[in-house]
Image (cartoon, rainbow, N blue to C red):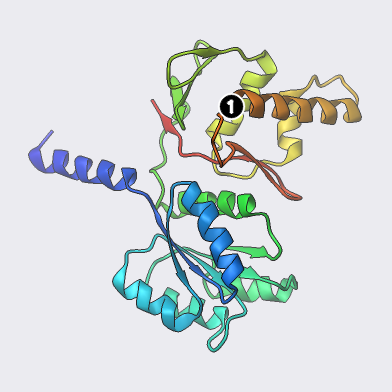
Amino acid sequence: MSHGSLLEQETKQNAQSMPRTLLIVDDDDDIRTLVAEQLSGAGFVTLSASDGVEMFELLNRHSVDLIVLDLNLPGEDGISLCRRVGQSRKIPIIMLTARGEPIDRVIGLEVGADDYLAKPFEPRELLARIRSVLRRSGTASDPVDIMHARRAHFRGWSLDFQNRCLTDRNGRVVMLSGNEFSLLKFLVENANDVLSRDQLLTLASPEDASDLSRQRLADIQIFRLRQKLHRDGEQSPLIVTVRNSGYVLAAAVKFE
């Protein structure tokens, strides 16, 4: 490999290891503080602005990986700001609004928003959507060929696909049932994508069980996985419930 290729690879790896910077634009002080605390706890660098003027001042001074943009702002509204950002910068945007009318969603996506979330929302749901948008936009880690991967590493955990084994950062083995392994493998392979409950049912429960029994078994398997993956003092759970949508494994995953 040439010196230039090595330098490019090292630069790329260093860039991927740096924390992502998110800009929160909302005129509600409480919402900005709540969202900033949640995202900072998840490892992101956060910047905050109360209107479009402050937003562009920060964009001119900082490199921003994603904008969380409220639709209803004093002065220039979120739709107009989203359009202006798209004309001059390639930055993913998640729109927030207190309204839920379909027309707002359509307009927001048409002017360049990458996702849309109505208030009130769970901060964990916003976190999952941010990770998903970063992954889709290419500003998260590059996609890899997972079809031939032997294991996956995520948040200190290692899942060995060949030996069907889960170990923690200290090398201790965590026992998984067959269904738990299949369920976790599917979550890992689709990390940061929201998976519906129906997608997980066949992995978490026998096909010959009744629909009600399968749903209960799926919930139990998710609960057990959460318990086994939980660490004391960890603020952000690995498996996040996305309201009315399903579940998501909220973590950066490295395959090898």
Q: Is residue 71 left or right of residue 158?
A: right
| Residue 217 percent across, percent down from the top left | 81, 25
Disc tally is 1
Q: Is residue 77 left or right of residue 209?
A: left
| Residue 40 percent across, percent down from the top left | 47, 52
Q: Residue at x 54, y 52 (%)?
A: 38
Mark 1 packing: few (<14 Cα in 10 Å), some, or many (20+)?
some
Res. 72 in view: yes
Res. 88 in view: no
Q: Is residue 151 above or below residue 26?
A: above
Q: Residue at x 54, y 32 (%)?
A: 189
Q: Is residue 224 above or below residue 145?
A: above
| Residue 179 percent across, percent down from the top left | 69, 18
Q: Residue furthest bottom?
A: 75
Q: Quadrant of residue 212?
A: top right
Q: Residue at x 71, y 63 (%)?
A: 120
| Numbered disc 1: secondary structure | helix
Q: Residue at x 51, y 10 (%)?
A: 163
Quadrant of the frame with the C terminus: top left
Three-letter amino acid code at disc 1? Answer: Leu
| Residue 117 percent across, percent down from the top left | 65, 63
Q: Is residue 151 left or right of residue 215?
A: left
Task: From the viewer's side, name the closer residue of 42 and 142.
Answer: 42
Q: Which residue is mark 1?
A: 229
Q: Is residue 44 left or right of residue 220?
A: left
Quadrant of the frame with the N terminus: top left
